[in-house]
Amino acid sequence: MTTTDKVRWGVLGVSWVNQLTLPGMTTADNAELVAIASFDDDRAREESARWGAQRWYRGFDALLADPDVEAVYLPLPNTKHSEWTIRALEAGKHVLCEKPLTPSSAEIERLIETSRRTGRLVMEALMYRFTPRWQRALQLIRDGAVGDPRVARLGLAFKQHYEGYNIRFDPDAAGGVVWDMGCYAVDMARELLPGEIRTVTATSWSRPGERVETSAEAILGFDDGRKGLINVSFDYPNPYAQAELIGTDGWLTLPGSGMRGEPYTRLLWHTYGDEVFLDGVEPNQESFPRADAYRLEVEHLSDCIRTGQQVRYPLERSLANTQVLEAIFESAASGTTVGLD
C-alpha cells in the first residue's frame, strides 16, 4: 500500500497506553501516524519524536483542526472519552477510543447519534477480538466443536498495588476493576455464547483503603438458560486460562492472556467421547505465536475507513456491553438480580 493510500492518524494525549497501541499503529500496513497532541508542549514534542509522527500540537482542538488527519486514537481517562469522541466526530474524524468506550450507556447513545449524523466511524478498542487465536476459537464454536454452548467462564486479573496516584483507583475518573477489565469479560461472554444477556447477579469487594471495587464477580443469564460466569480483580493474578467454554458436546479453553506480550498462547479443545486422559485421550491443542492485537485493530478500522464498510463491532455492541456493566454495579450494590430489557 502506498503512503497516500494509508489512513492518516492522530493521537489525542500522551497516556502510558500509547506504549501498547502506537507500536501497532506505526507498523500497520494501512495506517500512518502523522500527529500527536498534548496540553504539555514538551511531552507532545517528545512523544512525536519517539513514535515518528510528522508533527505535534498543543491542545487537542489544534490537532482536530488539521485537515490531513483522518482518524484519531483516544487514550484518555474514562470520563473524557465521550466528550472528545464527539468533538472528533464533529471535526470529521473517525475514532478509535480506548475501553471502556464511556462509563454511561446514555452517553453511548449520544455517540451513536453523532456517528450516524457525521458519517464517521467509532470503534471501542477491545483489541483481543482480532487475534488469530480468538478468531480460531470462534470458528471452532461455529463448526460445532463443543456442541451447543452452555457456560462461558471468564477470569481476568492482575495484582495491582501502587504508590502515589493510580487512575485505575480514582472513583472520580471512573476507576475500578469493573470498568477496567469487566468490559473485556462481558464482551468475551457475548462473543462465546449466543443470544442476549437477560439477567445479572453480581458481587464486589473493595480492598481496605480503596474507594473503588478491586474485585467483582457476576453471573450473566443468557437466553435459553446459558450462563456467563465472570470474575475480574486487581487483588490476584490471572488464572491459567482467562476464557473457557463448555458445551453439550465438548469444551475449549484459552491458556495465556494474549494481552501481555507472551511469546505464544494456546487453544485447547475436546469433543466428547471419552474423558481426557482416559485411555490415552488428549485434548486437541494449537499454539499461536504472539500477534500484535493493537496493530490488528488499527488495520481493521483503517480498512473500514478506506472501503466504506462498517466495523465488525459496531457501537450498538458497546451500548449493550455497557448496560450489562451498569447492571453489575446495580446488582452488587443492591444484593439482587437485575433484569435487562
Image (cartoon, rainbow, N blue to C red):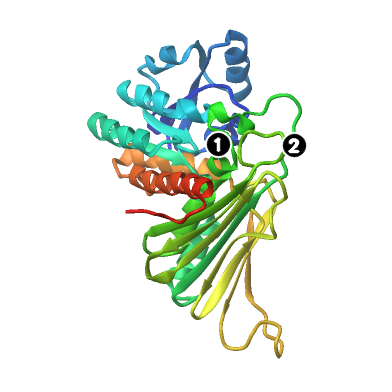
In the picture shown, does residue 112 fall above or below 259?
A: above
User: Which image quadrant is residue 50 in?
Assistant: top right
C-beta proximity under 8 Å, tags 2 and 1 = no
Q: Residues within 10 Å of mark 2 (few under 14, many from 20)?
A: few
Residue at the spot x=65%, y=41% of the render?
A: 206
Q: Residue furthest left?
A: 117
User: Which image quadrant is residue 117 in?
Assistant: top left
Q: Nearer the viewer, residue 158 or 271?
A: 158
Q: Quadrant of the N terminus?
A: top left
Residue 266 is situated, as x and y percent measured from the top left of the image, at 64, 62
Amino acid carrying mark 2 in the image? His
Q: Nearer the viewer, residue 132 or 312?
A: 312
Amino acid carrying mark 1 in the image? Thr
In the picture shown, does residue 332 fall above or below 174?
A: below
192 left or right of 155 in image: left
Residue 329 is situated, as x and y percent measured from the top left of the image, at 50, 44
User: Which residue is label 2 attached to?
Assistant: 161
Helix, strand or loop under label 1: helix
Q: Nearer the viewer, residue 94 or 337?
A: 337
Q: Residues within 10 Å of mark 1 (few under 14, many from 20)?
A: some
Res. 332 visible in picture: yes
Res. 258 visible in picture: no
Residue 194 is situated, as x and y percent measured from the top left of the image, at 39, 65
Residue at the spot x=35%, y=45% of the render?
A: 314
How many marks can you see?
Answer: 2
Residue at the spot x=36%, y=33% of the render?
A: 107
Q: Earlier in the sequence, mark 2 or mark 1?
A: 1
Q: Which mark is residue 27?
A: 1
164 left or right of 37 in image: right
Helix, strand or loop under label 2: loop
